[in-house]
Image: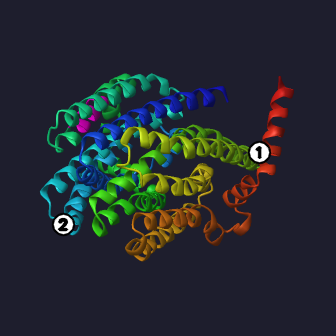
Amino acid sequence: MQKIINNIGWNVFERFFYAFCQFVLITVLAAFLAKNDYGLFQYASSFALIVSTIFLFVDDKIIAKQYAYLDSQSVLFNALLGKILLLPFSLFLLLLASQALSNSSKFYIISASLTGFYFLNTLVLTIKHYHDYTSNVRQIIPAILFFNSIELTLVSGIVYFKCDLYFVPFAMIAASIAKLIVINPLKYPSITQSTIKRESIKSIKKILFLIFRNYKMSFTLALAAICSIIYAKVDQVMIGKMLTFDDVAVYSMAVNFIALTSILNAPVQVSIFSKMQKLHTTNYKKYEYFYWRLTSLLVLLYISIAILGYNLIPIMLNILFGSKYLQSVEIYRLLLIGSLFIFSAIPRSIHYTLAKKEHVLLKSQFISVIINIGLNILLMPSYGILGAAIATVISQFLGLLILDPFFDSDGLKSLPFSSQLKSYNLMNTFICLSNSAKAYLNKL
């Protein structure tokens, strides 16, 4: 448990620092760029992120499960190589899809550059997840934080000195390449020697078999995650296509501040995986209780964060940008509702992965995407970006809570569904946490 707590601590620290860098970066871009240019950049960024979801076909949760019973160096090597082989497909998809969205060469160059940036980031995350599993993530956090700072400095300088917008993603790519070069020797000083040497004993056919096995095992989870990212980013893409880049800028500002509210999502999910995996295989009753207790804690934590954000973020927006992004306030406050379902469902994907019910995630997310796109088409012509926010919240509510029992064989007794419902009853939540505190004090 102590290792898990330490791991969460380092992950939270890294996420806070990353969020701080992103916050400063967003502030600089929004302050020094014209609203139209900022909207164009966010439009291209959302499109590139959707295209980059192809790299999710090597799912880090599937890879993490293999560390427990296979050689970790080989597992990591195959995971990285598997993602590299997907890069040409992502660029081909980018070329095809960009023709339907914009004829602007500027949009295409920025989108392609950002796709490269997201590709490098996914390699960094795969390496980082290896250290999350071994609880040695603190070894690479300083290097990651340093290069995040370099990226922020480069981009800020480019925007401040009014260089062309093209240079922003180029600077981000340069920082990410440097990050990869540095953190690989820190963690795997002999990866290009020992790992490849071991793999060279096997045939190329065997290596490809292992890579394609990762694709196959990740397929259902990847589709679910792709659906999740699409309904998180499709709003900005549809706003850019149906409305204006100024509207994209306003909506993106609200979404970026929501990211501050959701800062704990990723580190908590990564850090609890090994604990949930162990309980799931050794003591399912304790696993259920741990799941409910965790969900209850997350709900209370989110309510505290949301109350703070509800009051603080509008003040920050006003101080930083004045009336330029005033409309972002109501969008932000509306999106806070949907973030509750995201936060309380942090353990959900882990549970369905361990239970081998990934199809539940896929079906729920797929229907959510269809609903979100349909509601966008229906609401945006009349309500503009407010309609896009309403569509997002409704799809999050359905996809992360309501739809699960329809596809889970446990029905209404589905653990994620029942735990979330219990957690929304704050009395149950307080009782659960009170019992946990008493048990901890008794051990002392």
**Callout 1: SS:** helix
The reply to whether residue 276 is visible in this rendering is: yes
| Quadrant assignment for the C terminus | top right
Q: Residue at x 48, y 24 (%)?
A: 138
The residue mark sitting in front, 1 or 2, is 2
x, y (%) of residue 216? 43, 58
x, y (%) of residue 204? 28, 47
Asked if residue 435 is among those painted magenta in the image, a careful observer would answer no
Q: Main secondary structure of the magenta part?
A: helix
Residue under numbered circle 1: 286
How far, Cα to Cα, is label 1 from label 2? 52 Å
Q: Residue at x 37, y 22 (%)?
A: 186
x, y (%) of residue 140? 42, 25
| Quadrant assignment for the N terminus | top right
Q: Which residues are magenta?
A: 171-180
**Callout 2: SS:** helix
How dense is the environment of label 2, judged by Cα within 10 Å: few (below 14), some, or many (20 and up)?
few
Q: Which one is in front, 302 or 59?
A: 302
- Earlier in the chain: of badge 1 and badge 2, it is 2
Residue under numbered circle 2: 99
Indicate the amino acid at tag 2. Gln
Indicate the amino acid at tag 1. Lys
Note whether 166 is above or below 50 in the view shown: above
Note whether 129 is above or below 369 in the view shown: above
